Amino acid sequence: MGRNYSNKNLSILEIGNIEFYLNEGISPADIARLLNKDPSGIRKEIKKYSSYFGNQRKCSNCLNKDNCHQKYLCEDIRDKVKCSQCKYCSYAVKVCPNYKVIIDCELLKKNHHVCNGCHLYLKCKKVKIKYHAETAIKMHNAVQRVSRIGTKVDTFPEEFKSYVSRLIKNGISPQVIMNTLPNKFLMFKVSTPTVYS
């Protein structure tokens, strides 16, 4: 019979405990056992919310820069049009959950794909990938903010609006339009009722 794991979201204390245990060299499976969580959930948490640290953290170095569709990652959104694309924003790059670079380090494979607990951490000059509780909490908040934000078509760029209206005039349904958006418009994908509004 399987273990009865807690399915609740991780609390701030549990996120802090994950960082502490990783720094102590404890494996994700053992961390899951200590926190009474599913091991795959802890591995996903570490993988998704680990951050890159070092001078190299810039959008221009990100592997996802060409297909970046992040929007509204900042805590204080002053301009919905300007903030509808976070690419090259100096704050957004610090909390972006999709930021990735290639780090050529054999020790990462042994250390659960993070630099936490590595004995060479202070001497290493490479960009480091680390599970840092404070940054993970900011990233969790950014993901929640993006999922809750009210998106209205009138806040989108003119190029996107003209693309959608042209297709609607040609008789293509909004559902088909949203499901077949080109890459440059994927960040503006909305539900079909939103298109009608």
Image (spheres, grey):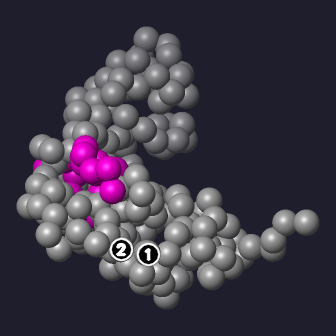
Mark 2 neighbour class, 10 Å CA radius: few under 14, some 14 to 19, many 20 or more? some
Q: Nearer the viewer, residue 57 or 116?
A: 116
Q: Is residue 52 rendered to the left or right of residue 192?
A: left
Residue type at the position of mark 1: Gly
**Region in magenta:** 84-107
In the displayed structure, 145 sits above or below 67; it is below
- Residue 132 visible from this viewpoint: yes
Q: Is residue 29 rendered to the left or right of residue 1?
A: left
- Residue 155 visible from this viewpoint: no
Q: Nearer the viewer, residue 165 or 177?
A: 177
Q: CA distance from mark 1 to mark 2?
A: 5 Å
The residue pinned by badge 2 equals 117
Check disc 2 and report its element: helix, strand or loop: loop
Q: Residue at x 81, y 73 (%)?
A: 4
Q: Earlier in the sequence, mark 1 or mark 2?
A: 1
Q: Nearer the viewer, residue 115 or 195?
A: 115
* Membership of 101 in magenta stretch: yes
In the displayed structure, 70 sits above or below 50; it is above
The residue pinned by badge 1 equals 25
